[in-house]
Image: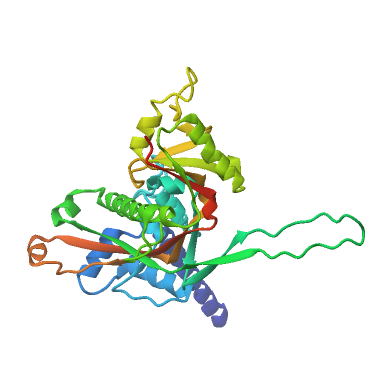
Amino acid sequence: MKDPIDAAAARTAHRAILQAQDALNLMSRSENRELSLVRIVDSLKSGRGIDGYDGEFLQERARLAGADFDPHYPNVPYTALAVRTPLAANQGSANGGFLVGTTVEEQVLDILRPYSPLLQSGVTVRTGLTANNVVPTVNGDVAGYWLSQETGTITESEPVLGSIAITPKNAGCFARWSRQLELQAPTLEVFLRQLFARQITQLIDTAAISGPDNVGQPLGLLNTAGIGSQSGSAFAWSTAWSVRTALANANVTDANVSWLGHPGTRTVLATRESGAGDGFIWSADDTLTGRSARVSTILPTGTMIAGEWSQLVYAFFGDGFVIDSTPYNSASDFATGISAMRLLVSVDTYLQHPAAFVAVNLVT
């Protein structure tokens, strides 16, 4: 006769195994899901706050980070704006899987880079800041000396140290869409991610170049003391090399130099010879003095900047975006079923080494 204690233990063990299998199956299904901006907005505008899979995910994420979770003003990871790459045919789950990392979130750099000529040029990105910061800088190097004899001494010299205060500046964008679009457009989620990523990137890039350091914006590169300046009047091949010389004198590594110009500036220089029969100043392969050259309308007309772009820093506060929605944006929105979403990010920009950049003004 079987021992009843052993039988009970076997049944308990069997139930534990089944529960573990159920948990693994649930986890497997969850890994094939993503946060959805559309679902989040639907939850928020209902007034009940974010719930369901999205709510559980964000609440657990906040708990692991030691942060408070507000279901009415959720903080979503930067990956919420990432456009996923579908798996090849016949791969993944039956409902269509995605190449989604399950352990490490993608960096904001990778999310915004496709829309940013500055990030493509090598801007440094810091994330996860939680409070105002003071960043040390060196405005004058320490002098070095050779010892002429065994008992020789080193002459004392002190570096000229400075600092940069960085504080969170808030940028945001707002979008509205109809209920019919939500029902009929299967790519609405992808479209919203691209729309918000592009607009946020343009806001940050524009401020990083020409921000006035007031009205809530960062101090832009062109308004930062200590950057080099070069007249662009009758820009010639010798002008370009004068810029490169200024950067070399500032101890900028040649290999790290690249150019960024307004599209109109490229038009001028791409049709001007560097020398008789020697090709054009801005070459057809988008290089200038042998270094990469990009264009963007975030630069003022007739302006060009050369430098080591890793010396420009984007400092993101927190570890994601804050999303909000309201069910009553306006009476007409309520009557027509319009959805609205606001996305906010806190960021500041600064130059670690202003002399690593030269601005060329009024290129003609």
Q: Is residue 1 visible?
A: no
Would you say 16 lies left or right of 190 here?
Answer: right
Residue at left offset 36%, top offset 46%: 299
Q: Quadrant of the N terminus?
A: bottom right
Q: Quadrant of the C terminus?
A: top left
Residue at left offset 45%, top offset 28%: 283
Closer to us: 97 or 247? 247
Q: Residue furthest top?
A: 277
Q: Residue furthest bottom?
A: 5
Closer to us: 237 or 221? 237
Would you say 109 lies left or right of 186 here?
Answer: right
- Applied colour scheme: rainbow
Q: Is residue 119 above or below residue 239?
A: below
**Residue 90's quadrant in the figure?**
top left
Q: Is residue 17 visible?
A: yes
Closer to us: 34 or 233? 233
x%, y% of residue 349? 44, 60
x%, y% of residue 144? 75, 56
x%, y% of residue 151? 91, 62
Residue at left offset 51%, top offset 32%: 238
**Residue 155's quadrant in the figure?**
bottom right
Q: Is residue 231 above or below residue 173?
A: above
